Amino acid sequence: MPDIQQFLHKLSIYAVPVVLAITFHEAAHGYVAFRKGDPTAKMLGRVTLNPIPHIDPFGTILLPAMMILLNTGVVFGWARPVPVNFRLLHDQKRDPIYVAAAGVVTNLGLALLSGLIFRALIAFDPALMIETMMHGGGPTADTPARMVTVPLSLMCVVSVQFNCLLALFNLIPIPPLDGGRIAVGLLPPRASMALASVERYGTLLVLLLLMFGPAGVIWRFVDILASFILGA
């Protein structure tokens, strides 16, 4: 039976970084699309950092909560995709690359910012490294300052890991993932059209990747990148 107290503790640490990562990712797509000529997301209220318009009940709430509850060791999720009318973009070949890359770049930027905050906290209080390794369960979280800095340092670690995971997973070159759209824009016309035609099966392929694909390989790269950013 799952430990409810442990679940609530993890949920309090994971909720803010996961929601922020997903919200910034989708808002970045909508903002760049608007700047490149497509007002669709702007008109629908999706160019916003308010997480509510971006929330997908399953991908943003239920799936991450289930993964935390089942103690899978990995948390994954997504938001409602921002609608983009690629025919309204100024440059039909180049601008979709910018729109697709915006989410990945934003997640990497959030990971770097979280890593800098984490390093600053560790420099201020090296004992936080022990707390982080013990997931906040160490004996040093007993002062007013550490009641703030311990959860903040844990959130920074989760933010780095989740943003790296979201960025690297989205770089897989399968439409409708961002990497697929980037590849469609970069490939020669014949190869580009062939890859674009895969999009009708893209959701199924992504689900198969999540179930049977090289998740361990992706997580290995996530771990390497996250460790580098955190200075671990």
Image: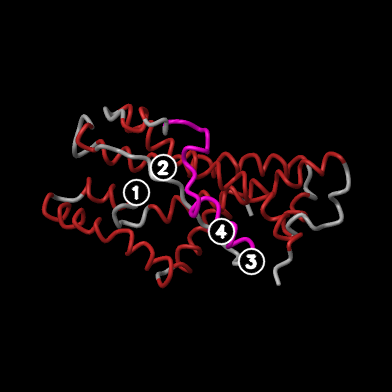
Considering every residue shown, the one lying at the far left of the view is: 190
Report whether 56 appears left or right of 186: right
For residue 111, the mark is none
Q: Earlier in the sequence, mark 1 or mark 2?
A: 2
Residue depicted at x 50% and y 50%: 57
Whole-angstrom CA distance, mark 1 to mark 3, is 28 Å
Q: Which residue is mark 1?
A: 178
The reply to whether the magenta stretch includes residue 51 is: yes
Q: Are marks 1 and 3 in contact (CB under 8 Å)?
A: no
Residue range (magenta): 47-69
Q: Which residue is mark 4?
A: 75
Whole-angstrom CA distance, mark 1 to mark 4, is 20 Å
Per the image, label 2 sits on a secondary structure element best described as helix
Q: Are marks 1 and 2 in contact (CB under 8 Å)?
A: yes
Residue 31, quarter of the rendered image: top left
Q: Amino acid at mark 4?
A: Val
Q: Earlier in the sequence, mark 4 or mark 2?
A: 4
Q: Nearer the viewer, mark 4 or mark 2?
A: 4
Residue depicted at x 72% and y 41%: 121
Per the image, label 4 sits on a secondary structure element best described as loop
- Pick the residue in front: 223 or 203: 203
Q: Quadrant of the N terminus?
A: bottom right
Circle 3 packing at 10 Å, graded few (<14), some (14-19), many (20+), is some
Looking at the picture, how far across and down is residue 14, in whole percent? Answer: 63, 51
Whole-angstrom CA distance, mark 4 to mark 2, is 18 Å
Q: Are marks 3 and 4 in contact (CB under 8 Å)?
A: no
Residue 90, quarter of the rendered image: top left
Q: Amino acid at mark 1?
A: Asp
Whole-angstrom CA distance, mark 1 to mark 2, is 8 Å
Q: Which residue is mark 3?
A: 71
For residue 103, the mark is 2
Whole-angstrom CA distance, mark 3 to mark 2, is 27 Å
